[in-house]
Image: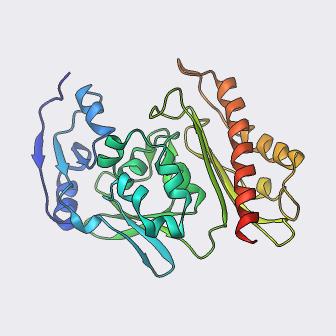
Amino acid sequence: MKPAQFDYFRPSTVKETLELLTDYGDEGKILAGGQSFIPILNMRMSEPECLIDINHLKELDYIKLEEGYLKIGALTRQSDLEKSELAANNVPILREASRFIGHSQTRNRGTVGGSLVHADPSAELPLTLLTLGAKVIISNADEEREAPLDEFFLTYLTTDMMPDELLTAIHIPIDSIPKGYAFEEFSRRHGDFALVAAASMLDVDEDGNILGGTIAAGGIDAVPLLAEEDDFNLLIGQKLTEQGIKEVVQKMVEKAEPDSDLHASAEYRINLAEVLIKKSLHKAYQRAIESGE
C-alpha cells in the first residue's frame, strides 16, 4: 500500500520544528527514524496532513556526560547508542538491551527518542530506560518540561505528549546506577518484536545482601511494568534466594493485564515473564557481586 497524500517539511532547527507543530497540531506528525511510523503510514493507519522530517536536526544527535547525567539526544540512532563507549562505560545495560532491537539495519535508522514516543510496551529502550529512572525533556514553542518515564507512558502506544510537543532529549542519572544489571528477552526469531522482556538492576553489600535496585518487564501490560518499591523491598537486606524471587515476581505479575493474541496467550506471557525476570535477577545479582570483588 501507499500512504495518503501529505505535505512535507524538512526543518533545520528545533525552533522551526516547534513552530510547524504549533501550526499543524494533530495534523502534523514527526518523522525521525521511521522504522515504526512508515509502515503505519503505508497501511493508512495514520493520514496526517503534513510530515515533519527532523533528520537534519543535528542538535538532537548526541551522547554526552553532563551534570551527573548521561544525556542522549532524541535523534541519536540506536546503533550509535549500541556502539557508544561512553554509554557502555557508564550505563552498560544500554548496550546489552540495544543489541536486541530488530536487526542492524533497523538500528541504523531507528532513533532513541522515536522508540520512546512510539511507546510499544514490549520495546527494549522504553523498558530499559524506565528501569534506569530516566526522564525525558519535552519542548513546545513556549516552554520546556521534564517528565519521568514512569509518568510518561500512559497506555498502549500512548504517552503524555501533546500534539505541539517534541521530545528532545533523554537524561539518565548515573551517580546511583546499581552495579549489577541484566536484560533478557524472548522473541520467536532473532530481530522479531519481543513477546516478553525483563530488565533488572541490583546493588549488594560486601556480604552479598541486596541494598537496592529495580525490576521491570515488558510485553505483559499496556505499558512497561516497573516493580513497585514495596514489592522490591522484599529482597532488601538479604541474599538473592529462590523464595525471594518468587515473592517479588508474583507481586509484579499479579498487577499485569496481558492480552492474548496470535503470538501468545495471556497465560503464556505471564509464565514467560516469570522466567525472564528470574533469569535477569540471577544475572544482575552475579554481576553486582563480581563488581565488588
Q: What residue is drawn where x is 78% and y is 53%?
A: 231
| Front position in the image: 55 or 240 | 240
Q: What residue is drawn where x is 64% and y is 58%?
A: 181
Quadrant location of the C terminus? bottom right
Q: Can residue 152 be seen in this view?
A: yes
| Left or right, residue 98 beside residue 26 | right
Q: With respect to residue 33, does 289 lie above or below?
A: below
| Front position in the image: 42 or 97 | 97
Q: Which colour scheme is used?
A: rainbow
Q: Where is residue 116 in the image (x, y as percent from the top left)?
A: 43, 51
Quadrant assignment, res 44: top left
Q: Which residue lies furthest to the front in this view?
A: 293
Q: Can residue 151 be seen in this view?
A: no
Q: Where is residue 168 in the image (x, y as percent from the top left)?
A: 33, 63
| Left or right, residue 160 beside residue 14 | right
Q: How many marks?
A: 0
| Left or right, residue 254 beside residue 150 | right
| Left or right, residue 293 beside residue 81 | right
Quadrant assignment, res 187: top right
Quadrant location of the N terminus? top left
| Front position in the image: 78 or 33 | 78
Q: With respect to residue 288, does 28 lie above or below?
A: above
Q: What residue is drawn where x is 54% and y is 71%?
A: 173
Q: What residue is drawn where x is 83% and y is 73%?
A: 206
Q: Which residue lies furthest to the top in this view?
A: 262
Q: Where is residue 114 in the image (x, y as percent from the top left)?
A: 35, 50
Quadrant assignment, res 118: top left
Q: Which residue lies furthest to the bottom in this view?
A: 67
Q: Where is residue 36 in the image (x, y as percent from the top left)?
A: 34, 38
